[in-house]
Image (cartoon, helix red, strand yellow):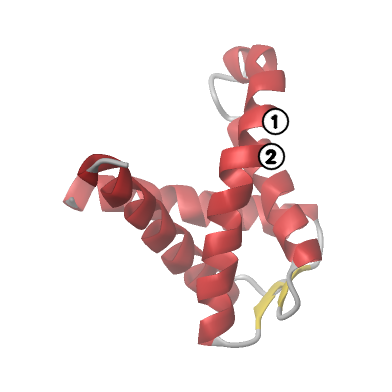
Amino acid sequence: MSANETGGLISVFIVNFLGVLLGAHYLKRVHLETFQKGLVVALVLAILNVTLGSVLNFLATPIRWITLGVFSLVTDAIVILVASKLMKGFKVESFMPAVGLAIIIAIVNVLFDWVF
């Protein structure tokens, strides 16, 4: 694994972590028990995005083209809901808060890319 790949993984982890923390703070129906759980959730989200997220994005490619990429938020929300089901201490109550969390993570990602 090269330094760029390692840096990319670290940046994805940081973006997921900050997004989950902000989402748990600002969204009423997203709950995170502890700061440490946020670290674990960020890791689980990174792993799920590489596996399940890649498959969902591949299957949804025609819909993503038609919606100009907006449907990516739906696939991200599905990954977030799966992470919520797998993790104790992290709860997303329904689909719309998961979409909201996906939007927050996307905004953090844009800001992170813009700054760094």
- In the rendering, at what x and y percent does residue 58 appear? 64, 21
- Mark yes or no: residue 111 visible: yes
> What's the amino acid at mark 1?
Leu
Element at label 1 = helix
Tell me: residue 19, above or below residue 107. below
- In the rendering, at what x and y percent does residue 88 appear? 75, 77
> What's the amino acid at mark 2?
Leu
Q: CA distance from mark 1 to mark 2?
A: 6 Å
Mark 1 burial class by Cα count in 10 Å: few <14, some 14-19, many 20+: some
Residue depicted at x 18% and y 50%:
116
The residue pinned by badge 1 equals 56
Tell me: residue 100, above or below residue 65. below
Relative side of 107 to 93, left or right? left
- In the rendering, at what x and y percent does residue 75 appear? 68, 37
Q: Are marks 1 and 2 in contact (CB under 8 Å)?
A: yes
The residue pinned by badge 2 equals 52
